[in-house]
Image: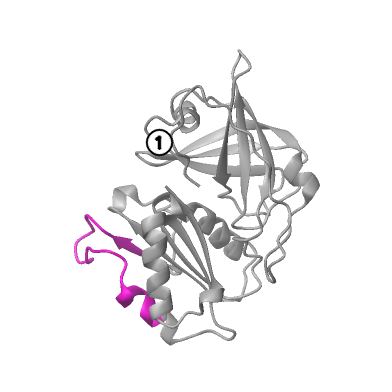
Amino acid sequence: MTETSAPSTLRTTFTPATRFAVPGRIAVSEQAAADWRTATLTAIRRETPRAATFRFAVPGWTGHLPGQHLMLRLTAEDGYTAQRHYSIASAPDDSGHIELTLDHVEGGEVSGWFHTEARMGDRVEVRGPVSGFFAWPGDRPALLIGAGSGVVPLMSMVRHHRARDLSVPLRLLVSARDPEQLVYAREFGAETTPVFTRGAPRGVPVGRLSAAHVAPLLAELPPGGWEAYVCGSNAFAEHASRLLVEAGQPVDRIRIERFG
């Protein structure tokens, strides 16, 4: 997930949602959502000029489902704290470790610290996993659509699909300005179709996500149909969801996570 800029004087508090009454939405552990754990930074991997993946060792981490997120807290020497929601990028089988992929948000105090100050061995606090609404356990065909850093929770699903060698169909449509801005470009395989809005490799069309990308996937439904997961900015989420509905995807089988 992407943070929004906040004044340095802001003191944030957070009460996690721990239950969902809507059928098909996964309840999360109240204990896991409430407890802060110490996470130690063990690796930093550059993804794009403005995005990097941060890997943490988290003793006692209870695991997560692809699509879930956590709360992260930084505490300064003077006691000031800053908290943000971040989607988990790693697959759940990566026991004792989690990965977060963060954009460097202009004016973002948390992402700014990670991109300019963080070093291996630094410690932060994490709480979660939080929210079962956007989670995908791998039990049904998944059609994933994301833009920019909205691909982060979707990549957790792709990695889970590969790690478990799941037989259920999974497809990913991911939008980026150009190949240089495509997060996880080195990892994408046959399940992924990139869409470039500003610049593309020779022979690849440039343009916004359109019905031409979505309609073919809805025309040949897998058994049971798709469960669609859309993640991106408010504008992108509205656009992608509209394309899905127009192509025949049931509204109640579209899950949306948005930011901005």
Magenta-tinted stretch:
194-216
x, y percent for residue 135: 62, 61
| Left or right position of 243 against 80 | left
Above-or-below relation of 37 to 88 = above
Q: Which of 131 and 145 is in front in this view?
A: 131
Q: In which quarter of the image is residue 195?
A: bottom left
Q: In which quarter of the image is residue 133?
A: bottom right
x, y percent for residue 60: 78, 40
x, y percent for residue 73: 62, 31
Mark 1: which secondary structure? loop
Q: Which of 64 and 7 is in front in this view?
A: 7
Q: Classify 10 Å Cα crowding around label 1: few (below 14), some (14-19), many (20 and above).
A: some
Q: Is residue 15 magenta?
A: no
Q: Which of 42 and 135 is in front in this view?
A: 135
Q: Which residue is drawn at 43% across and 55% down?
A: 232
Of all residues, the one furthest to the left in this rendering is: 202
Above-or-below relation of 123 to 146 = above
Of all residues, the one furthest to the top in this rendering is: 78
The answer to whether residue 61 of the structure is visible from this angle is no
| Left or right position of 185 against 155 | left
Q: Report the magenta stretch's main SS.
A: loop
Total numbered labels placed on residues in the image? 1
The answer to whether residue 179 of the structure is visible from this angle is yes
Above-or-below relation of 51 to 29 = above
x, y percent for residue 86: 55, 44
Q: Does the magenta stretch include residue 214?
A: yes
Q: Residue at x 42, y 61 (%)?
A: 237
Q: Which residue is drawn at 44% across and 31% down?
A: 108
Q: Name the residue under label 1.
A: 105
Above-or-below relation of 192 to 113 = below
Q: What residue type is labelled 1?
A: Val
